[in-house]
Image (cartoon, coloured by chain):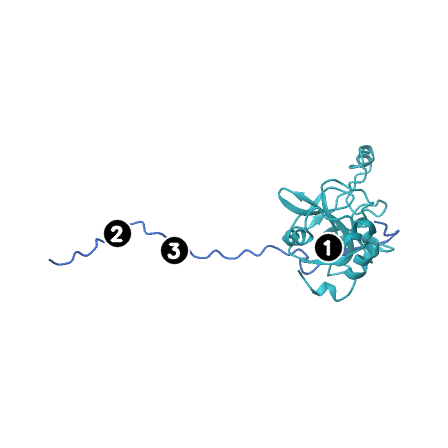
Chain colours: A cyan, B blue
Amino acid sequence: MIVSAPDYVGPLEGWRAWHVVERDGALRLVSPLYRTAWPAREAFAAACRRGLEQGVSLYHARTRHTAPAGGCGCGIYGSFEPAHAVAYMSRFFKHREDVVHRVIGTVSLWGEVVECESGWRASRAYPRRIYVPRPEGRRFFFRGLRRPALPAAEIALALADYGVSVQLVACSSVDELAEIASRPDLGQEAA
Amino acid sequence: MHIGEPQRTVIVEPVEDPVPREVRLPKEPVDKPETGPREPEPVPAP
């Protein structure tokens, strides 16, 4: 029997964006691309859903595999830099009626992990730090971000269910959010 | 998210669980209500 030693004994930490939706009376994080909610206090497990939610079901049936697979795009994503993640915060990106707000943060990634040029795709993940943008001034809507459907403070409080650091970030644009969130001292403060 | 081409696959096995588990506090002891017959009140001597 061949047993391979792990390459890392601590989770990798990447950046990503989530959409916030209401599920069963609670606010939950979902991927910007898929509708599966990240459970609170439980690891989120990857599954290859490529084609499933775009209505191309034949693709999945022929190529079923565990996630992440090197030759597929599946797995739970985390990027090295916040700038990659904030693109999914944009109000121009795939708006859904049930999205209450869009947040960014860091994510712990572990299990089997495909290391890519500027990020990772993992088989297991859990939020590590969550940054909830709080609109500042009237420009919020016009500079890339959509105003939240609920007060940002209320959303931050609800996301405390995840048991990790949740922080309100006053900002007026997507770029400003990325810049503030990546400050090394910010992760030390929890809301 | 565009994170570029795959470079290699690694195995990550955290020593500590990255998921903060719910802290279950022990239940406080609850005083049981009295269920037996009450002691008769002492009657003052005439």
Q: Which residue is mark 1?
A: A134
Locate residue B36, reporting x and y percent.
28, 50
Question: Which structural element holds mark 3?
Answer: loop
Q: Between A186 and A40, which is closer to the camera in this rendering?
A: A186
Q: Between A75 and A2, which is closer to the camera in this rendering?
A: A75
The dot on residue A111 is none
In screen coordinates, is A127 left or right of B9?
left
- Residue at figure coordinates x 81%, y 57% from the top left: A82
Q: CA distance from mark 3 to mark 1?
A: 47 Å
Name the amino acid, label 1: Arg
Question: Which structural element holds mark 1?
Answer: strand
Residue A5 in sight: no
Q: Is residue A101 above or below residue A166?
A: above
> What chain does badge 1 belong to?
A
| Dot 1 and dot 2 within a common chain | no
Q: CA distance from mark 1 to mark 2?
A: 62 Å
Name the amino acid, label 2: Arg
Q: Which residue is mark 2?
A: B38
Q: Between A157 and B27, which is closer to the camera in this rendering?
A: A157
* Mark 1 surroundings: few (<14), some (14-19) or many (≥20) residues within 10 A: many
In screen coordinates, is A163 left or right of A124?
left
In which image quadrant can residue B24 be found?
bottom right
Do the CB atoms of the residues marked 2 and 3 lie less than 8 Å apart?
Answer: no
Do the CB atoms of the residues marked 1 and 2 lie less than 8 Å apart?
Answer: no
* Mark 2 surroundings: few (<14), some (14-19) or many (≥20) residues within 10 A: few
